């Protein structure tokens, strides 16, 4: 049989519901798990083509991140562990939405357009989060891979960033580490232990951290890496999945959206807590003060802490490397002001979606990128890594420069550069706080967030809103931006923008202003202008 006959026959076991249309958005496909079997099979097919096209191993992660347990989804990972190239997202959408009888034509179209040689070997790494539906759905991916003659390696239950990491390790022939969870645990924990050797006076109390595992994969994987961390960390895990449902009133998204602590976690006033999301690629920190007021340290605060640390090490090392922080329009205005005016680092604003942030961050030797919701990491250029390594090994370098270079080197190794990673970000943050002897209150006080409000509204067709300037200004419909501008003028220290969501059928509205009342009022006024 020709490969197309195999695909055709096998596709009958993964039929598409007629008329169902789903887009490959900024987070891949996401929907109720019952709608996804055909999508999974077809993403198995696409992963084979992408592997032949790049002559490298490709990743397929079955997850719906912070969505409820009933949902699921899938994202494809490119050879260096980054999100699949935007130029292939259209193919994913075409293939996923082709009616059953048009599937082979849709497949052939991609093969022709990309001049793919089907005789090449194809290798696909597969992973899934803890959703029950993930078992069957990942089997559907495997059928898709085999139907087109590809080979798959199933990593089973892994966090999204662990799969990104494994793909990069595989394609860089071990230079990035061993392509396994064990390899990941060893690399990150060794770097963390090295880094925290510089935290001379850190007590066990100061080391203590409460983690909300969102009842998901992050909890399982934190338990595994904890065994390697030995006495360098002191973690209490809550929401480990044994009692409640995934993401149910817990997890990074819940905490960020509701600005309150997750249920199921016990933290004393003043103590540090953090929440992972459902696939452990996002993290936020928080604490409650003596008056039981809740304080959130989001992606902007995390980016700031990491930037302060890296910038100090750069200065001490004497290395001449470019550094920037990449944010989105959702970044709190106070964080942008602090980074640019006080810390004096380059700050850039990107469109929402990690792949856009990553692309911008890669233009610098050191690129720190974070979305306000806690998704982010740091990327280092090859030349930066080489220079750091050389200085760390240089016998003629002075002690301060060498120590800084060694700490930079450990930071490079603790960071998962492929994508935002809750476990890796947590280890870096914990190490920084320990080294600097900084409390979460001191970290929080670096700058004061401007009060803000984010709301979403349903409109007939969200695509009528088109934006420019990293989504900060609307170019259509006509008159909308002028209306927003005049509303913003009525409030002090105000800013507001609207954009269509890339993951939900809604328009998102963001407003910030001098007071919470003002931010709330502005968000409401702008929402009325959107209708
Ligand atoms: P959309 O739905 O396009 O706003 C959301 C998040 C993004 C990103 C993606 C992918 C906000 C405001 N938006 O995108 O930051 O995380 O989901 O998961 O948080
Ligand atoms: Zn996630």
Image: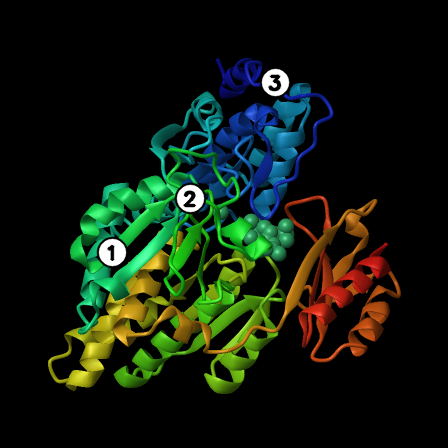
Q: Is residue 177 left or right of residue 294?
A: left
Residue located 49% across and 26% down the image? 133
Q: Nearer the viewer, residue 493 or 157?
A: 493
Residue 482 placement (x, y as % from top left): 85, 71
Q: Residues within 10 Å of mark 3 (few under 14, many from 20)?
A: some
Q: Does ligand 1 reach within 8 Å of label 3's beta carbon? A: no
- Residue of label 1: 234
- Residue at 35 percent across and 54 percent down: it is 210
Q: Is residue 26 left or right of residue 516?
A: left
CB contact under 8 Å: marks 2 and 1? no
Residues under numbered marks 3 and 2 in contact, where contact means CB atoms less than 8 Å apart: no
Residue, x 72% and y 69% (percent of image)?
Answer: 517
Mark 2, other Cα within 10 Å: few <14 / some 14–19 / many ≥20: many
> Upstream in the sequence, badge 3 or badge 1?
3
Q: Which residue occupies 26% across, 42% down?
A: 224
Q: Quadrant of the C terminus?
A: bottom right
Foreground pick, 161 / 263: 263
Mark 3 or 1: in front is: 1
Residue 177 at x, y = what percent?
A: 25, 51
Task: Tell me, yes or no, if residue 180 can be seen here.
Answer: no
Which of the 4 image quarters holds residue 437?
bottom left
Q: CA distance from mark 2 to mark 1?
A: 24 Å
Name the quadrant containing residue 59. top left
Secondary structure category for the residue under label 3:
loop
* Residue matched to label 3: 15
* Residue receiving disc 2: 160
Element class at badge 1: strand
């Amino acid at each position: 049989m020709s490969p197309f006959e195999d695909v055709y026959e096998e596709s009958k076991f993964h039929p598409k519901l007629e008329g169902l249309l789903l887009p490959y958005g900024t987070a891949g496909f996401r929907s109720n798990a019952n709608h996804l079997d055909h999508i999974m099979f077809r993403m198995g097919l696409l992963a084979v083509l992408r592997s032949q096209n790049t002559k490298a191993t490709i990743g397929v992660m079955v997850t719906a991140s912070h969505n409820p347990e009933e949902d699921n989804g899938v994202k494809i990972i490119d050879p260096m562990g980054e999100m699949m190239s935007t130029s292939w997202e259209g193919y994913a959408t075409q293939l996923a939405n082709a009616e059953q009888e048009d599937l082979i034509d849709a497949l052939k179209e991609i093969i022709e357009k990309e001049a793919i040689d089907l005789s090449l070997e194809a290798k696909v790494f597969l992973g899934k989060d803890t959703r029950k539906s993930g078992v069957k759905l990942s089997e559907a991916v495997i059928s898709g891979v085999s139907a087109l003659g590809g080979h798959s390696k199933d990593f089973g239950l892994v966090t999204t960033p662990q799969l990104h990491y494994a793909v990069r390790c595989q394609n860089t022939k071990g230079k990035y580490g061993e392509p396994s969870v064990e390899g990941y645990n060893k690399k990150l924990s060794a770097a963390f232990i090295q880094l925290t050797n510089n935290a001379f006076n850190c007590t066990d109390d100061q080391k203590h951290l409460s983690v909300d595992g969102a009842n998901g994969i992050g909890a399982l994987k934190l338990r595994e890496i904890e065994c390697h961390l030995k006495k360098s960390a002191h973690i209490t895990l809550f929401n480990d999945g044994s009692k409640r449902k995934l993401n149910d009133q817990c997890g990074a998204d819940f905490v960020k959206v509701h600005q309150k602590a997750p249920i199921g976690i016990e933290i004393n006033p003043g103590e540090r807590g953090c929440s992972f999301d459902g696939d452990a690629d996002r993290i936020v920190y928080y604490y409650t003060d003596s008056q039981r007021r809740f304080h959130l340290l989001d992606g902007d605060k995390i980016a700031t802490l990491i930037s302060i640390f890296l910038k100090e090490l750069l200065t001490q090392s004497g290395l001449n490397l470019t550094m920037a922080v990449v944010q989105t329009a959702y970044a709190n205005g106070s964080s942008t002001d602090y980074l640019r005016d006080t810390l004096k680092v380059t700050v850039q604003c990107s469109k929402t979606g990690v792949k856009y942030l990553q692309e911008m961050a890669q233009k610098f030797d050191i690129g720190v990128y974070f979305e306000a919701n806690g998704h982010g990491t740091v990327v280092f250029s090859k030349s930066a890594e080489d220079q750091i390594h050389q200085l760390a090994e240089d016998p003629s370098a002075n002690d301060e420069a060498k120590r800084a270079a060694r700490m930079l080197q450990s930071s490079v190794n603790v960071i998962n550069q492929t994508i935002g990673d809750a476990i890796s970000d947590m280890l870096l943050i914990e190490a920084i706080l320990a080294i600097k002897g900084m409390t979460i209150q001191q970290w929080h006080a670096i700058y004061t967030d401007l009060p803000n409000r984010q709301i979403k509204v349903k409109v007939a067709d969200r695509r009528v809103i088109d934006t420019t300037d990293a989504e900060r200004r609307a170019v259509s419909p006509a008159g909308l931006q002028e209306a927003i501008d005049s509303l913003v003028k009525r409030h002090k220290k105000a800013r507001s923008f609207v954009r269509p969501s890339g993951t939900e059928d809604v328009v998102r509205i963001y407003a910030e202003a001098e007071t919470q009342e003002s931010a709330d009022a502005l968000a409401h006024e702008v929402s009325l202008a959107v209708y």
